[in-house]
Structures are given as C-alpha cells and as structure tokens.
Amino acid sequence: MITSADVEKLCCFRSPQESVLSLYVQVPRDPAGLREVPARARGLIAAAAGQGSLRSEDEQVALGLVAAHRRAQLGHTLGVFVCGDLGLSEVTLLPGGLCERAVLAVRPHVRPLLATLQRHPDYCIAIIDRRHAWLLAVNGEQVETVAAATGDTVASRELGGWHGLDSYHLERRVDELARHHYRDAAQLLAAATRRNGPEPLVVGGHADGINHLLAELAPPVRDTYAGCFAADAHVLTPARARDLAEPVIARWSEVRERQEVERITGPASGVRAAIGPHACLAAVNAEAAKVLLIPDGGTIPGYRCERCGALSLTGDECCDWGVASRPVPDLLEEMALQAAHAGAAVVSVAELPCGAAASLR
C-alpha cells in the first residue's frame, strides 16, 4: 500500500524533459480478462506518447512490469513509473477502481496516489464487549493489535437469588463494573489519539457495547468516529475485523467528499469560494486556497513558470510574461501539490461538474 513517504520519494524524481512515464492500469478480478491488460496498457501509453519524449526502451520496461505483476494482483490497479535517464523503474500496488491513464511529464504523475491516500487512510478499530477491549491499527493490508484491556469479572444478573435487596445490589455492581470497563476502553482510545494523531475510528461489537463505549468517548476521539460493524468479539480475528471495517471507512470517505463539495459549491454554502479551474489557479497562485477540490478523472494541460512558480492556462499569466513558463500535462496535479505545500487540504472528488473548486482563507 502506498504511503505519504512513497509519494514524496516519487516527487523527488525530476527530468529536464517530459520523459517520465506514469501508467495506471486496472487488473480485473476475473483471470479471464488478464489477456486484455497489456493491450490496454499499450493503448494508454500510445495516447500519452505525444505529451513528451518517450523512449521505446522505457515503454518496453513499463509493459514488462505490467506483464510481470498482473497475475499476482487481481482486482487491483498497477501504478508503473519508468524513466531510464533517472534510473526509475517502480511498480506500486493500489486499490481497484482508479481512473486508468498514462502521463509523460518531468516527474511522476501522483494524483491517483493522493486520491488513494485520501480514501484509504490509516485508521483504528476498537473491538468491545462487556469484559474485553482491543485496539487494532490498520495500515493498508497490515493490521496490528496495539492495545488490549480486560475489565473486572462481571457476574451474571441471573445469579441474584431472591428478587430483593441482593438482586438490587448485584445489578448495581454489574452496571458499575461495566461503566468502569467502557471508561477504561475510552481512555485507551484517548491515549492512542494523543500518541498517533486523529485517525478515523471504527468500532466493532454488539450494539449495546458500542453505544456504551461511544457515550464514554472524549470529544476529540468522538470526532474521529467513522462508523461501526456488528460482530462477536470472541471469534473475531484481526484480519476479519479489517475486512468488516473497510466498507465503513469507504462510506465515511464518500460522505466526507460529498459534504466538502456541498459546503464549498452548494447554493447556500455561504463560503468564500473560487469556482472553476481559472479561479482556482488564481487562488492557488496567491496561496489563498484553504480546501481545494479536484476531480478524479481528466487532465488539464497548462503551464508553470520555472522562476515564480505561477500556474496558468496560457503560459503568460505571471510576472515574467511567460518567458520561463514550460508546459505541464496536468494543471490539476500541479495545483494539488502547490496547494498542499502551502498548507491547504486537497480533496479528490469522484464527480465535480465545475472542474475544480476551492474555499478561500
């Protein structure tokens, strides 16, 4: 699974000319469709060849990497990055469903990687029942148990004897021990949040245990809650917990995207916003963007000034009047990286009719 460090490492590769090939091609889940993958990859590369200076050797290396990895990665997307001049030849495994594309540029094209990091973040799973609590950390395909807690023994309510004072005291004791247990589990989550930062939280267990835990969470932890799933904690393995949590994280990510789009572009948003690529370019160049929305698909060719860093559609919209501007194949990616460098949040959106949008500082 890709990490932020991997993206930063790729962005360090830079060629003096548009000779870095970035290829994203989907591998079908059905093995019968594998024979079509090389042809699709070849077609994507051919469409991108006019964007720069692609060496035939680099094309063959990229196709060879696709052929070597396609059978082992059913249902995923292969990210392939090749440039013989820079000694770059890497394959990255990504979740399926990304937009296929090939791009020739002076550095690797990382927009799909940024979208993957956004929609598949590291997150925590809290598994809870009346006596036990486990905290799991999920990083891509890896899942690790990082903490566990066991409450005091809670007697059964059915052992109260006569329905009188003894039963009343036992029920009070059961409730008190249960509250302590959920409070301890909440403190465990609070400590993890302070240590690792605010990561999305998924809670698994029975409905009553989940509700009791949520009631005990401190506000900073409660704000990270992404959703829950029902499961019997005693038979739940870490791998199974991750499988149950993945759809929860996917829904959480999708809802957040829709909320950001509505908040910035909605008719009653009340947010100072830049709508459309041209307005967003101006906001990014002025470092005025607070949240930048970019679509998953499509690219917008444009220019970047090598002196002042200004991005433009025409190449002459900077203080140097285009003297040092050079073409870039995708202004959306340039905007995303430049906005993130200036401290803005960048959100990739599945469908964004306006092309790009940003809330302003």
Image (cartoon, helix red, strand yellow):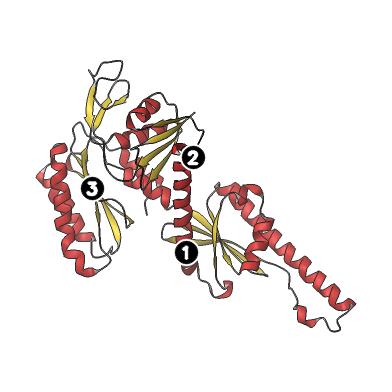
Label 1, residues with CA under 10 Å away: few <14, some 14-19, many ≥20: many
* Residue located beneath label 1 in the image: 242
Rendering coords of residue 34 (x, y %): 20, 64
Residue 246 vertical placement versus 13 (above, below): below
Which numbered tag is attached to residue 101? 3
Which residue is found at the position 20% from the left and 69% from the top? 32
Q: In this view, does 224 lie to the left or right of 351?
A: right
Q: CB atoms at circles 3 and 2 under 8 Å apart?
A: no
Disc nearer the start of the sequence (1/2): 1
Q: In this view, does 306 lie to the left or right of 358?
A: left
Secondary structure at numbered mark 3:
strand
Q: In which quarter of the image is residue 205?
A: bottom right
Q: Distance between the residues labelled 3 and 2?
A: 30 Å
Q: How far apart are marks 1 and 2 (CA)?
A: 31 Å
Disc nearer the start of the sequence (3/2): 3
Residue 122 vertical placement versus 321 (above, below): below
Task: Tell us which disc is closer to us: 3 or 2.
Answer: 2
- For the view shown, which residue lies furthest in the front direction? 267
Which residue is found at the position 33% from the left and 46% from the top? 296
- For the view shown, which residue lies furthest in the bottom direction? 161
Secondary structure at numbered mark 1:
helix
Q: CB atoms at circles 1 and 2 under 8 Å apart?
A: no
Which residue is found at the position 74% from the left and 62% from the top? 180
* Residue located beneath label 2 in the image: 263
Q: What residue type is labelled 3?
A: Arg
Which residue is found at the position 57% from the left and 73% from the top? 232
Rendering coords of residue 274 (x, y %): 41, 30
Q: Which amino acid does label 2 sit on?
A: Arg
Q: What residue type is labelled 1?
A: Arg
Please state which of residues 141 and 348 is positioned toward the viewer in this rendering.
348
Residue 200 vertical placement versus 357 (above, below): below
